Image: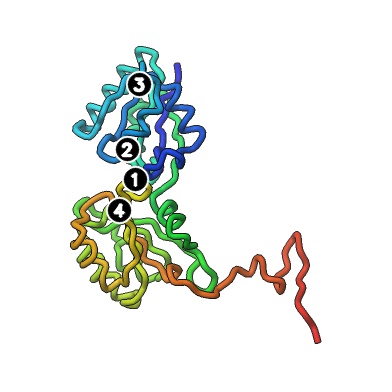
Amino acid sequence: MNPISIVGAGPGALDLLTLRAQERLKSAEVLVWTDSLIPVQITELVNDSCEKIKTSSLTLEDIILILIKKHKEGKKIVRLHDGDPCLYGAISEQICRLNDEGIEVEVVPGVSAYQATAATLGFELTIPDLTQTIILSRADGRTGKPEKENLHKLASIQSSLCLYLSARHVEEVQSIIENYYPSNTPVAIAYRVTWPDEWITIVPLSEMAKTSQERNLIRTTLYIISPTLKIGDNRSKLYSPCHSHLFRSSQRKTN
């Protein structure tokens, strides 16, 4: 039988779907999709005969039963997730339960919101002498995190910090981060990036919570806190004429 395809829809824009994701959608006979997080336009890529099942009101158990039933019927199934399914996609529990039933699963990656936001703004998140590290995380929140990954420890690195699922806790997040980043550190706030109603702005860290509350942002929001969001003259050594590597000798001038 065909494996069930867990497919990343990317951040929302149709043209940011991977070619593999498009192919899986076009051949799907059953689409099980996260309707609260994915634009309906993406689901229109499936054939007219494809059965579409929304999951926003379903439990994991409901979804698994549907996937098992449709798989036993011999259907080609796409389980469509927003962004990249490997990042806050809760796919591990789905894969484990399906594997227990002897059902093979493939995962098709998608562009994540942090990538789409940085691209939209035209900024690089890893710049020499500023930071070479990107941390993807979330506020500690109601569901909690391992203590070794609490926000104090992550912020203390002062890297490019990308926070998902954190808009409801933005005041607490700002109060923690201000202990480690200067108050004028740029923060990109991205709401529904690449959707038709996308809203993105860059504010100082000191205005992160205020701006979020003024816009009533409580979900589908990403924060990028990073010193790289300032225009500067930092450059990579890779393309410097003074730097040599396997394919190029140094052009360093000597007196």
Q: Mark 2: which secondary structure?
A: loop
The residue singled out by tag 4 in the image is 191
If you read the primary sequence from the N terminus, does the residue marked by circle 3 or circle 2 appear first?
3
Q: CA distance from mark 1 to mark 4?
A: 9 Å
Q: CA distance from mark 3 to mark 2?
A: 17 Å
The residue singled out by tag 1 in the image is 195
- Circle nearer the viewer, 3 or 4: 4
Splitting the image into 4 quarters, where does residue 64 fall? top left
The amino acid on which the numbered mark 1 sits, given as a three-letter code, is: Trp
Q: CA distance from mark 3 to mark 4?
A: 30 Å
Give left or right: position of 159 versus 143.
Answer: right
The amino acid on which the numbered mark 2 sits, given as a three-letter code, is: Pro
> For residue 39, which numbered disc appears in the image?
2
Q: CA distance from mark 1 to mark 2?
A: 7 Å
Quarter occupied by the N terminus: top left
Residue 138 visible in the snapshot? yes
Tags 1 and 2 touching, CB below 8 Å: yes
Q: Mark 3: which secondary structure?
A: strand
Tags 3 and 2 touching, CB below 8 Å: no
Q: CA distance from mark 4 to mark 2?
A: 14 Å
